[in-house]
Image (cartoon, helix red, strand yellow):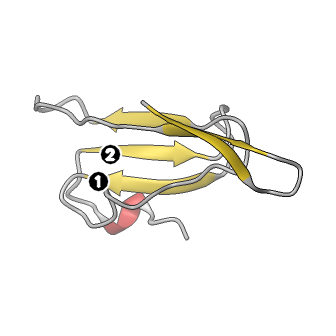
């Protein structure tokens, strides 16, 4: 379930995480600083994921950090390798 940006009107900067590499790929999650959900795992159903940072450019702050992992999945859906970055 996507958390829509319009629920956080006081959020000047946010990120959109998409299920694929294109700007029109389905949205997996939209996150604003200070809201819940930042520590939850987000999994793409494809071999790529897009993270978009959106800013109103009115203020400056420290930003955010992100980590990701990759997994190789066999034909039966079993994880055979996982790497962290």
Residue of label 1: 32
Give the x, y percent position of residue 65.
26, 35
How many numbered discs sit on the rendered protein? 2
- Residue 31 drawn at (x, y percent): 36, 54
The image shows residue 45, relative to residue 66, as above or below, that is: below
Task: Please name whichever residue, 70 or 46, is drawn nearer the observer in this view of the structure.
Answer: 70
Q: Residue 81 placed where, x, y %?
A: 64, 40
Quarter containing the C terminus: top left
| Left or right: residue 67 compared with residue 1 | left
Quick one: label 2 or label 1, which is nearer the N terminus?
Answer: 2
Circles 2 and 1, Cβ within 8 Å, touching? The answer is yes
- Local packing at callout 1 (Cα closer than 10 Å; few below 14, some 14-19, many 20+) is many
Can you name the residue that lies furthest to the front here?
Answer: 80
Residue lying at 27% horizontally and 60% vertically, measured from the top left: 9
Q: Nearer the viewer, residue 39 or 80?
A: 80
Tell me how far mark 2 sits from mark 1, CA to CA.
5 Å
Q: Label 2: state its secondary structure.
A: strand
Q: Tell me the quarter of the picture where residue 60 sits.
A: top left
What residue is pinned by disc 2?
Answer: 14
Residue 68: image x %, image y %? Answer: 45, 38
SS label for mark 1:
strand
């Amino acid at each position: 379930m996507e958390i829509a940006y319009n629920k956080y009107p006081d959020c000047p900067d946010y990120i959109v995480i998409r299920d694929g590499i294109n700007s029109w790929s389905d949205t997996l999650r939209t996150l604003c600083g200070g809201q819940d959900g930042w520590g939850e795992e987000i999994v793409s159903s494809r071999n790529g994921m897009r993270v978009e940072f959106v800013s109103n450019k009115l203020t400056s702050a420290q930003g955010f950090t992100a980590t990701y992992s990759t997994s190789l999945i066999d034909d039966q859906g079993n994880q055979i390798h996982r790497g962290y970055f």
